Image: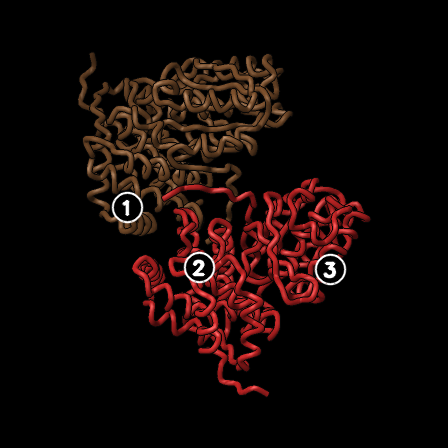
Chain colours: A brown, B red
Amino acid sequence: MKFNLHIPTRIVSGEGCLKENAGLLALGKHALIVTGKTSARKCGALDDLLPLLAQAGIYTVIFDRITENPRLETCYEGGQLAARMGADFVIGIGGGSPIDAAKAIASFAANPTMSPGDLFDASRRQNPSLPIVAIPTTAGTGTEANPYSVMTLPGGEHKKTYSAPDSWAKVAFLDPRYTATLPVPTTRSTALDAFAHALESFLSPKSTDVSEMMALYAAHKIWAVIGNDPAVYNMEMRRELMAAACAAGIAISITGTGFPHPLGYSVTLLDNVPHGAACALFGGDYIEYNSREEKGRERIERFCAAIGTDPKTLAETLPRLSGVKLSFTEEEIDRRIKLISGAKNYVNSPYVLSVEEMYEIYRKHFGAKEKE
Amino acid sequence: MKFNLHIPTRIVSGEGCLKENAGLLALGKHALIVTGKTSARKCGALDDLLPLLAQAGIYTVIFDRITENPRLETCYEGGQLAARMGADFVIGIGGGSPIDAAKAIASFAANPTMSPGDLFDASRRQNPSLPIVAIPTTAGTGTEANPYSVMTLPGGEHKKTYSAPDSWAKVAFLDPRYTATLPVPTTRSTALDAFAHALESFLSPKSTDVSEMMALYAAHKIWAVIGNDPAVYNMEMRRELMAAACAAGIAISITGTGFPHPLGYSVTLLDNVPHGAACALFGGDYIEYNSREEKGRERIERFCAAIGTDPKTLAETLPRLSGVKLSFTEEEIDRRIKLISGAKNYVNSPYVLSVEEMYEIYRKHFGAKEKE
């Protein structure tokens, strides 16, 4: 297998890593900080960051309008703001959403004449993005260590991924303290997202020696924590989860994700199921369908052996941890499958799921509800 | 432990990777190719490269004066040449030496008023180095994936390491075919060098999750090949060794090396023992001394378990594979220890070697010779 490697992001980690490595913030004199309404303040990241920027003489504006499943139009507005203030770089603080948003904003800021939809057209992104700094406050998406930025399109029913050679963060600061204020269910669902990245990357036909190494490293650490479904997450667990989420983010930068991701998008967008929980729900199906082929079965067995479990336990535990309990009518299922059946992820595993099988899976999980 | 990561080099690998990724060579219009007298031609790398550069309209000059243990003065001359020709970037092709040399030349070229010794003084290297491309033709040093450049100082009795934030290659092309013309003893000794990197990195107190991952990946692959001391190296083995050497190069970019490296420098410079063989000879001692402390013993046991051997076998096999057979008088030993006793590597393992112990080790291996 190939040893290919390209990780443009410098990753520093540990409690206090922002202050210890403040010099890495010197990417210009004007910074737009991109964040959600409250979490960056509540977790302490903003309180750590602002004095460091002030000491470095960096003028900052805070754009705190990013919601979960960040909207393309909001990122466009953030880009316009960044351009108007003359931002030299963009700092994303938060879970996946503000960091994904920071990537889009960094491109809009450098190309203020682009329309929102132009983001997905490399020929319209003429100027390179502003440099991006990522400060994750969840241990989940791994967006701090890959080029992906998942945007929710106008209308709110579709997601589309933006990715470019310059949509990697220049620096990522992984301080597990910033995840300490997360409630247990959020900690669990974000960890399940990272676990899904590791599992789906490992089974991808595009996996390489490096993606495998990162995937197994991540899965082993996450399983050791969430396999026991702890009632409290201590700092040591949070440290492990943060490193793991980042490694899993690197793994999918090489391979992309598999079918649990698109299967989950519908219930995330329409039914507010957290993204990681949705991935875990369909993670059981991912193991089951892929076990039907020799190549898939072999890979799953190797994955399970490396993390210290077996396929049956894993396939049962993931949906249980997801905690998802929903039921839909046949019409509701139909609407949800139509939203996701066009994704590319279905070919990214040994077993390629058909549209009929998507219905099969949805009916199995959600099909109890009578027509209203 | 920390998940810190900073690998500025883009690594592509596989047979034909140069041609497949020729676009990555577009780093300017004028390139200085740095290489040794014959190996880059013999192995086919130069024949692959030159047409690609010509097709891309890149004007090239070949500087083929790099010897093993590259001399600082020669690199200075190469830098002057690069500056005179207006080189935009530097391509190192060869074993460790031409790539190490390319790093130094890239800095001299960007700073043509520096004197040779200024290379080691960050304040004198005012302009950033020219971009560097690395095309290894051995699977050993790992210099393609770290910032180190080991220079032999005027007089030929001392080595000094140059390393800077911009002394990493921009791109490295790992094509195992380029190692196919290497004689078996060279293949073995370069593999032993890479193995030494993995082992010494793993035991370093500076090791991180990432350096450990890379070290174990490398050691496992190398041991699977050289543990059996094959009479012929096939392409599959060469592919494994090349990936492993690169991973081990990344590992030491984080941790540095341990005491086998400086212990070996004297016999490499004065007695022509290949660098990797010298490291392997003292690798046995490295295991033995570090086993005297609990922390060292634990690490060695974990390392051996991960690669599928035991400490005793490893400690016996490494010196045997080195094939070194030399004997010195007490005066000769004294001269060699004096050259190496000032190195910093001695503190970079659980067991810190004293100068008395350096004599002890040298006498054990070489102390049979009567005064002439």
For the residues labelled 3 and 1, the Cα–Cα distance comes to 61 Å
Residue under label 2, please give it: B200
For the N terminus of chain B, the image quarter is top left
* Residue that appears at 52% across and 44% down: B7
Q: Residue B74, which numbered label?
A: 3
Instruction: Count neighbours of disc 1 (C-alpha within 10 A) and say few if under 14, some if 14 to 19, many if 20 or more.
Output: few
For the residues labelled 3 and 2, the Cα–Cα distance comes to 30 Å
For the residues labelled 2 and 1, the Cα–Cα distance comes to 43 Å
Element at label 2: helix
At label 2, which amino acid type do we have?
A: Glu
Q: Position of residue B200 (x, y in %)?
A: 44, 59
Q: Is residue A88 above or below residue A231?
A: above
> On the image, which quarter does residue A138 sit in?
top left
- The residue closer to the viewer here, B124 or B283, is B124
Q: Residue A292, which numbered label?
A: 1
Q: Position of residue B302 (x, y in %)?
A: 32, 58
